[in-house]
Image (tube, rainbow, N blue to C red):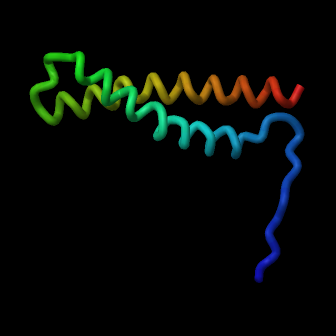
Amino acid sequence: MPHVERTDPDGVDYGWVMQTTFVVAIAVGAPLVAVASLFVPSLNTWPARAEFAIRVGAVLWVVIAVSVFLYARSRVE
């Protein structure tokens, strides 16, 4: 069995922030984008749906990432 390295980061653990952002974006963000798409009548084609999901999903990803980072930073200090 290979030895597993452990780290004790000073400050914010960015690996944790990235992993948590990914999980929250999939678990919360994807359903929010799907529900939001129900209220947009102009999504008649697959390219329009994909563009909507990318635009709204990108904004949600940034909001989630900043929120997770601020939470992690508040827990460190």
* Quadrant that contains the N terminus: bottom right
Expressed as whole percent of the image width and height from the top left, the position of residue 63 reads 54, 22
Expressed as whole percent of the image width and height from the top left, the position of residue 49 reads 21, 30
The one of 35 and 1 positioned closer to us in this rendering: 35
| Number of marks present in the image shown | 0
Furthest residue to the bottom? 1
The residue sitting at 86% across, 30% down in the picture is 76
Which of the 4 image quadrants contains residue 47? top left
> Horizontal placement of 77 versus 48: left or right?
right
> Horizontal placement of 50 versus 14: left or right?
left
* Quadrant that contains the C terminus: top right
The residue sitting at 72% across, 40% down in the picture is 14
The one of 64 and 35 positioned closer to us in this rendering: 35
Which of the 4 image quadrants contains residue 34? top left
> Horizontal placement of 57 versus 67: left or right?
left
Furthest residue to the left? 44
The residue sitting at 86% across, 44% down in the picture is 9
> Horizontal placement of 38 versus 27: left or right?
left
Q: Is residue 62 above or below residue 26?
A: above
The one of 32 and 63 positioned closer to us in this rendering: 32
Q: Is residue 13 above or below residue 66?
A: below
Expressed as whole percent of the image width and height from the top left, the position of residue 35 reads 31, 25
Expressed as whole percent of the image width and height from the top left, the position of residue 67 reads 63, 23
The residue sitting at 72% across, 23% down in the picture is 70
